[in-house]
Image (spheres, rainbow, N blue to C red):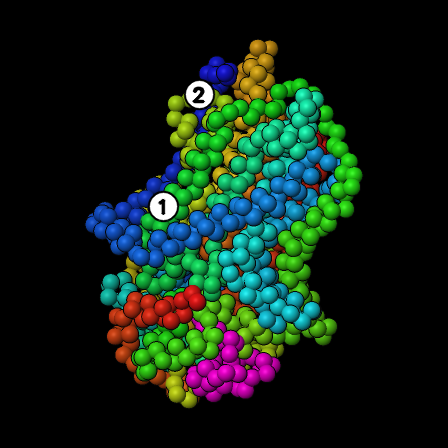
Amino acid sequence: MLKSIKGLVTGAVSTLLLAGVAHADITVYTAGPQSLIDKLAEGFTTETGVKVNVFQATTGKVMARIEAEAANPVVDVLISASWDTATDFAKRGWLVPYASPNAEKVPAFLKTETAVAQGVSALGIAWNTKSGTTKPAEWADLTKSEFKDLVNIPDPAQSGSSFELTAALAGQDDFKLFKDLKENGAVIAGANAEALNPVLQGAKAAVFGAVDYITFGSKAKGESIDVIFPESGTVIAPRPVMILNWSKNQDEAKKFVDYMLSDAGQTLVAKTFLMPARSDIPADRPLIADLKLLSYDAAAVQGKRKETLQQVSDIFGAD
Amino acid sequence: MSAKDIGGVAPAAWLALGGLVVVVAVPFVAIVLQAIFPAIGMGSFAKPFSLLGATLADPRLLRMTGNTVLLGTCVVIASALLAIPLGVARALYRVPFAPVWDVLLLVPFMIPPYIATLGWIMTLQPHGYLEQLFGFNLAPVLFSLFGMTLVMTFNTFPVVYFAVSRTVEAVGARYADVGRVFGATPARAFWRITLPLSAPGLAASLLLVFAAAIEEYGTPAALGRRAGFDVLVTGIDTRVGDWPIDLPGAATLSLLLVALSLAAFLLQRWILTRRSYQTVSGKPQNGDKRPLGYFTLPVLALFGVVAFLSTGVPMLAILSTALSRTISGGLALDNLTLDNFAAVFGNSAGALGALANSLTLGVATALLTGLIGVVSAYVVVKTRMRGRALIDIMTVLPNALPGIVVAVGLILAWNMPGLPFTPYNTGFILLLAYCCILLPQTARYATAAFVQIGDNLEAAARVFGATGAVAFRRILIPLVFPSLASAMLLVFALASRELVASVVVAPVGMQTIATFIWRQFEQGSVGLGMAMAFVTIVLTTLLPLVCLRLLSRKSLIKE
């Protein structure tokens, strides 16, 4: 028995060691979909021979890791799902200014000196086509009685884009829409995936402000679900790519950004149902030009983040 | 009272201490420093205590703490009510199909709590599997304190069931029989003799349940938030999980959780130190169990209902989801597919690599925590070394540390610049994380087992010329091995599915089972995630059973 234990331990130790040995040429932390970064990394390595090592999690978990690592950071390229992180990191002076030659076709509002969008997602109404309800066209339609108790709202405290939608809409009518939703039995239901799942099974009929690309993905798999972008406007969440100034592989990092914005890279982005950042890359879904965007002062909205979240939790708090 | 300090203790003590310092003290100190010095991540000791006040002054803190204690207490009570009758029946009577029930009640251990919760949601919510089959749903029951308690109890009560059935079996009917001889009724003999003598195992398992309940994230997040029921762990996750990150706040709340768990631990210790629980004295035990008689059917029915609710419902929900082409297709024949399982075995998205990583880590964690746990427990219970209380407390500290905070502590500690070597960004960091989170399991079980072993056994060996090390290896280890083995199997199962710490601390490019499942859920591939979960549960249930089988052949543990 001792011998077999010894064998197990040696096996375990060597596996663990091997996991750490794979030296990557660049390290990418991403809040984007795993399948996308896997394909991007593969394509980049074939093209340049530079290896990419990946850590993927939600924006919050990625940031927690970077924050905890701050004394001895290892990340070269960061892809966040929230533009605030790009603004904040730029303010801290952590970013390398870089204008990729491939970023020319990226609209000006999707790039700064230190960050450029990889792709863009938008929020819409995710609606179960077999739910027996009338197809909603507007945010306010979800306050109608046929949607009584049938609406999920992703938690604005857990999702950056959901917060912006909440703040922008609440700013228009001082939370009246949200009070009506609450009256109609809508509930705040965890992060994006958690809010969508009950709609797929039919426990709920619609998600108020679902991330579009996940929903398009489900639809492509054959789920009876659709995305509706209300005429009155919605918000978009550009996903910024940044190069960190502590990176020892800045040249390779820049090449990675170039690849991501190349025709091949942007096509991969489009395949995940995100809107490509470059306006000249086609995608099988509505693009930014097709959407009406709510106008609001992003800086002011972020400044009142705490108050807004408090008001939301006051409205949707326990009965 | 005991045979002490005859030599041979020192190496054991140093081993225990060394292991505990690396596994527990290092990340714990990092967390304490983070709570005090907000900028410690940047390597700066600036502005100590500057954020502590704001965190503690949060008006929601009191409610979250209260909810945490309430939930933990409810789960402990419910687990005790469910597990003690079953455990006692299993230990003292000949329950038909006993091994089958043991396996069925083992499975809930192996179901990751977040998966079980999702299974329950998909079963009970409107248009869920229950409604698709029988036309009604139980959503209002599910999204409440009651529902949360129920789901968490079905997940954790096996800890108590196995502890009670093992310890009551060890106490045996012999002591109760003595009571009967002196005229006690069967009920009186049970309440006054058998149950009190089984207290160490029972108390240890209830403590683990309490700690697991206050540290559990998935269920309160999925069920509690909608019922407006915030607990400390969800508060911690909000601080770590959303921009702007508040690591000092998360660290402070974690210390509060640790304090709660420590209080429960001290209570348990106080109960146990008031009297002696030594029942394993070297005298031969009468292993005969009694027939159930008239109670056979009711007891079987009870086992059946509990096994169905704790194992059947979640497993069926997981399987139905894994076999569905689309979720919206529901339970329909034309919606049936094996694609998800084919994807897992076809290594889609690195499924097989994730499986191999997690199973390896699970085995390594079980071996390491087993070693450190048994040595620490020995030093604490069987020696009078100075500082042994410190060792005892170190083995219980991680009990209530949420996984995410252990992860942050490990990064802070092991990613400091200038370390000559570091496990960070290798698989070893996950091993450290799992050992830290799970060490209390082996340490608690081993301690409870040592408490029940009479000192005269070790003394007898020493009298016959055995060194301390030989007595430890030849006498004590075989006696505690049954408890230790079940604890190590539990650690294996828990480690191979750990989610929260893994998500943050996993080395770049390395997937585990749980991070794989979680990514599938995030991307809307619920079916693929559930298929992976099903494969994992089957594997983590079968592997330990095969191990036990092999060990019992070599008569290391007797069934």
Check residue B517 for magenta coloring.
Answer: no
State the image coordinates of residue B464 (x, y, percent, origin top left). Answer: 60, 10
In the rendered view, tell whether residue B172 sits above or below residue A129: above
Image quadrant in which the C terminus of chain B is located:
top right
Is A36 in front, or is A18? Answer: A36
In the rendered image, which residue does mark 2 sit on?
Answer: B384
Q: Is residue B379 above or below residue A61?
A: above
**Left or right: where does residue A145 sit relative to residue B100?**
left
Q: Is residue B546 left or right of residue B371?
A: right
Identity of the residue drawn at 58% across and 57% down: B116
Distance CA(mark 1)–CA(mark 2):
29 Å
Question: Callout 2, which amino acid?
Answer: Arg
Q: Is residue B247 above or below residue A314?
A: above
User: Which residue sits at x=64%, y=49%?
Assistant: B107
Closest to the observer: A301 or B125? B125
**In the rendered structure, which segment of residues is drawn in magenta?**
A125-154
Q: Position of residue B170 (x, y in %)?
A: 64, 29
Q: Is residue A151 magenta?
A: yes
Q: Secondary structure at mark 2?
A: loop
Answer with mark 1 or mark 2, whichever residue precedes in sequence. Answer: 1
Q: Residues within 10 Å of mark 2 (few under 14, many from 20)?
A: some
